[in-house]
Amino acid sequence: MKSGKLFSGCFLGLTTYDIFYEVEKLPGINSKEMALDQHASSGGPATNAAIAFSLVGGNSLLVSIIGQHPVSRIIRDDLAQYAVDLIDLDPDPTILPVISSIMILKGTGSRSVLYTDTAKRQIKNLPEGLYRRPFEIVLVDGHQMELSKQLCSFARRENIPCVLDGGSWKDGTEELLQHIDYAICSEDFLPPGCSSSSDAVSYLKEQAVSGIAITRGEKPVLFSDQGVDGFVDIANQSNIRSTLGAGDIFHGSFCYFLLSSGGNFQLALKKASEVATLSCKYLDTRSWASDPDLQKIISGADQ
């Protein structure tokens, strides 16, 4: 455990290597477009959440497929830079990690993403050593569904809260929800038979998920807290440069603030939304950590 940090989280799911560009316009077929700026870093829902958890003050353990490919080594160095511990599920030296190419439209924060299938490499069993590692909260993004069910089942038995990053509905999600305490989902998360976020909230209530939130971009976050429904307003969104990774940063921050607030779900949502909004001022998914406003958010997390 890293000195001086009070809370520890375990994040299980996808790791990618993201290369992103800021552009005036998207290139057309058989055309070229010079980017205004560029950046590259590790990415993926669980990975960005783990880094965010570390940046706001926690101890992060990432459980993911990284490998030993030359690109994998860049990812490892990036994780080490942000003090994220790693359990590599498949250290295959021949496999190229998932690489995402992302174009961000200047002035809007909108993005276009190109990536490969992330569901091809499914691991069957968690490493035994994971169960001996200390953590106080678990987040899964569903990209390793069988492992997610194993880890959350274990965490439930140990009274460790489990958080689902529900980017979209995936095969196996219904079984996973049996072990989930908090579901933080996007508008794209639509269970079978659901056609709206309200339907999704009702479905999650039926699955006995105690804390539910649907993030909706610049619109207020829709939530249900042990049956009490409401909205969390989004902070002023002036000077948006990129929304890339904002949802992942929301999830990682939420995990930290849930612990630091003693389980105050609505406060954790509010603080996480403030951090995610802050991150949108920057092209990359890391520079927000140096913004002076971050410390104001963190220091007020338990108020």
Image (cartoon, rainbow, N blue to C red):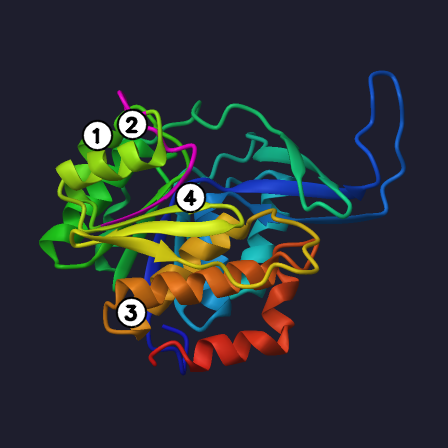
Callouts 3 and 4 close, C-beta under 8 Å: no
Which residue corresponds to mark 1?
174
Q: Is residue 170 left or right of residue 274?
A: left
Q: Amino acid at mark 1?
A: Glu
State if disc 4 and disc 2 touch (CB < 8 Å). Answer: no
Q: Which residue is mark 3?
A: 259
The residue at which mark 2 appears reads as 191
Nearer the observer: mark 4 or 1; the answer is 1
- Relative to residue 145, is residue 109 drawn left or right? right
Tell me, for residue 64, which label it has, or none.
4
Magenta portion: prevailing SS class: loop
User: In the image as oriented, which residue stretches furthest toward the left?
Assistant: 157
- Residue type, mark 2 in image: Pro
Q: Position of residue 132 (x, y in %)?
A: 22, 59
First of labels 2, 4 by sequence position? 4
Q: Give the CA separation, mark 1 to mark 3.
A: 26 Å
Mark 4 or mark 1: which comes first in sequence?
4
